[in-house]
Amino acid sequence: MFWNAFEKFSVQGSQFLFGVLLARLLVPADFGLVGMLAIFIALAQIFVDSGMGSGLIQLKQRTKHDFSTVFIFNFAVSTFVYLILFFSAPYIAKFYATPALLNITRVIGLNIIINSLSIVQRSRLKIRLDFKTLAKVNIASVLISGVCSVFLAYSGLGVWSLVYRQVIYSVISVVLLWYFNRWKPSFTFSKESFKNLFGYGSKILAAGIYAQVFQDIYNIVIGKVYSAGSLGYFTQAKQLTALTAGTVTNILQQVTFPILASLQEDKERMISVYRRLIRMTAFFIFPVMTILALMAEPFIELFLGEKWLPTVPLLQWMCFARILYPISTLNMNILKANGRSDVFLKVDLSKAPIMIIALIITIPISVKAMVIGQVVTTLISFFINAYMPGKLFGYGILSQLKDLLPMIYATIAAAFFSYLSTMVTDMLILKLTLGVLSGLGSYLFMSSILKIDELKEVKILLAKIHR
């Protein structure tokens, strides 16, 4: 958990710094153009993996034929999917009425084939819980690709600096993964292995497609109904929340799945770990997202500049839309880790009508209304996601809310003092500094008063790291 957290926050911190530089060198429409393609690339990547990477992790015993089968399947599917995307590029450009998307789609789509070469390598490291090596690979990749993209943007390449950034990142990470992993495929394809892995992974694939469509459909709608500039503001708000809630969610998805899967035979211990993870997640994410929402205006103006101020209300609402997302991820991960990919899929699909209704209502109003709709659907989704773990493992909605209440009380206090401290000055940097420090300080003080166990755990962990 430590190494994965170190990697994720290092990567997100680096991406934020490079993002600030790129935001000052480029215009919102450049980010919007890349955002228009997000759903196509993400869906293609899900098809390539097909849930089989997760299948390898979930297996109790794995053979060389299992790894080789997944590798061959991933590469074959990635090539096929890229060809579809390549020949679909003119239609994508026509759909958005943006001719520049033709070449952008074909170049950025190369990531699909490149990333297929790393799926087995990443799965092998996760199975061994070797997140230290993954940290080295991802941090090196983001630094090299970030430096290259800033140089290209400074040289006047515009949106292509964002495109090449993604391609360079993929190439560097694949090269490093193969160097550190020292695994070579045997190039044997086992029908039996494929049948077992795809039987499990197909449900994860279906759930992944569904989740990605609803996550990125906003990009399609905003890019089509509104403008590239509006999508640029939305994309920037989305990326900033990814620094916090998104990072925690990624850590939980990558680390907790193999951990919980390894505890399948010890239900009591697994549920104990699961409960501690939910409490620790809330302990970190609740105050951070709330303070980010309160500090959105000085934060955006200070780091990105006045041209990005329309991002502020979107960022504020998106913070609250993402605040429960990491906990929902844990509730879904415990189903997946126990081999219940069928239940995982059913729970995910049950939320579709709610999200569709929210979209239908909010699309004609404004981009801000669409984000507010996300807040409502996220809250409802939390209750849906928590229901099945409660039924199967005895740790459901009421138990989770009872555990989360102390963190909610402490967060309300933090929000009050954070907002109060910003009233004393109009200087952006001082307002931001006072807001963050007073908010976090009051949160830690209230956590101590309320005797929140997670504060003690953090102190013990920091002491161990220091030693």
Image: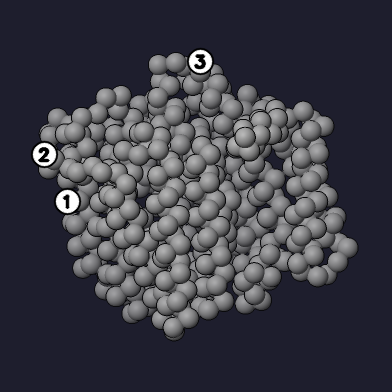
Q: Three-letter amino acid code at disc 3?
A: Glu
Q: Is residue 222 visible?
A: yes
Relative to 354, is 438 on the left or the right?
right
Rate crowding at label 2 as few (under 14), some (14 to 19) or many (20 or more) other CA atoms within 10 Å. Answer: some
Disc 3 secondary structure class: helix
In this view of the protein, can residue 335 be seen by the observer? Answer: no
Under circle 1, the secondary element is: helix
Q: Which is nearer the N-term, disc 2 or disc 3?
A: 2
- Judge from the rendering whether residue 175 lies leftward or rightward of residue 441; answer left or right: left
* Residue pictured at 79% horizontal, 46% vertical: 441
Comes first in the chain, label 2 or label 1? 1
Q: Position of residue 316 (x, y in %)?
A: 66, 58
- Mark 2 sits on what residue? 188
Q: Amino acid at mark 2?
A: Thr
| Picture residue at 62% right of the left edge, 77% below the top | 307
Horizontal side, residue 205 vs residue 450: left or right = left
Q: Is residue 304 above or below residue 114?
A: below
Label 1 to label 3, Cα distance in Å?
41 Å
181 and 111: which is toward the camera = 181
**Residue labelled with disc 3:** 268
Within 10 Å of the Cα at label 1, are there few (<14), some (14-19), or many (20+) other Cα atoms? Answer: some
Per the image, the residue denoted by label 1 is 76
| Disc 2/disc 3 C-alpha distance (Å) | 39 Å
Identify the mark nearer the N-term, 1 or 3: 1
Q: How many marks?
A: 3
Horizontal and vertical percent position of residue 128: 36, 33
> Looking at the picture, which amino acid does disc 1 mark?
Ala
Q: Are marks 2 and 3 in contact (CB under 8 Å)?
A: no
Q: Where, quadrant-wise, is the C terminus in this rendering?
A: top right
